[in-house]
Amino acid sequence: MAQARIVGKAAPVSLRQVTKIFSGDVIAVDNVDLNIATGKLVTLLGPSGCGKTTTLRIIAGLEMATSGTILIGNQDVTNLPATDRDVAMVFQSYALFPHMNVMENVSYGLKFSGYQKDEVRERALAGLNLVGLRDFGSRLPSELSGGQQQRVAVARALVLEPQVLLFDEPLSNLDAKLRRQVREDIRSIQRELGLTVVYVTHDQEEALAVSDEIVVMRNAAVAQMGTPRELYDSPIDSFVADFIGEANLIPCEIQRTRGNRATIAVDGYEYELPARGMQPGDATLAVRPSRLVLGQEAGIDGCIAKATYVGVRMEYTVETSFGSIFVVHDDVNTPLEVGHRLKVGFASSGPVLVNRV
């Protein structure tokens, strides 16, 4: 028999006006429309209670939508139970059987898929090979690290060759270094096999690192969807700006607009940027800490209130007439002292006008 290999058979996912209402009229998912292309990794990101995990469970068939339509490939699966949907899920808690060794855990689902015993073993070995654990088949879960246990859970899902692979907060139980390694492994496997993946996390850095697209959710609905760079550079409102990475939300005045450009003023400091359809008047500016420039000739008057060395950069809290702003600076050799007065300007690109929510 030829050696088994794991093959991606990805399919697109579409949610059309999907709503989930729990007892007591609690709206967990509110009229959500999503189109996830074949072979893409899309992350549902948002704070606790925003509806991201419920949305994932609706795709999996672990929760049934109150209204709306769910399509996987060309099949309407809205009313199908989880067992009849060609999906596999990797849970936050790993959900490994403690009394089974690694090989038995990975093989478990295959035993119900009509494969012969030898092919089950070959496919399980292929799955373990993909996650770098081919030689760990005889170990019990208790003999593995947290990162290794999560890789076993990934292998167990991969060997089923699902149309859609779902991840529910898969890295939340791992320390920072392991999180980075395992997320790189997941992304590498997803790209190698061309898998369609829906991935839930509340960690912004994790979402930026692994995603083709990010769906930011707020109050059970979609706040904004786009590529990591689109969301980071062009957030639609103050919530998305502050949730996707850190952002200083600065009150400003749009003094005038001309075409698609606006001239704003902050504490007397003028700056030109895209108008984004906004008109003259009070507005909110979102500025990333790395896109503030310290010590410019023209800028906002400020005073260093805190200075923190974090190894690769300095972090400063600067007090201004409208409140404090957070600035990061690469110069760690000549740090600014607390009490130092200076002007803070904006980088040539980066500040963006946003709707306040």
Image (tube, grey):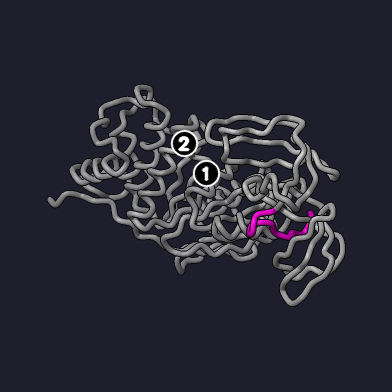
| Of the pair 336 and 79, the residue shown nearer to us | 336
The image quadrant of residue 184 is: top left
Q: Is residue 172 left or right of residue 292?
A: left
Residue 185 in view, yes or no? yes
Give the residue at x 74% y 59%: 354
| Three-letter code for the amino acid on which mark 2 is drawn | Arg
| Of the pair 100 and 306, the residue shown nearer to us | 306
| SS label for mark 1 | helix
Spot the residue most to the bottom: 259
Percent across and percent down for residue 37 are 47, 64
| Of the pair 310 and 211, the residue shown nearer to us | 310
The label shown at residue 179 is 2
The earlier-in-sequence mark between 2 and 1 is 2
| SS label for mark 2 | helix
Magenta stretch: helix, strand or loop mostly: loop
Q: Report the span colored magenta.
A: 346-357
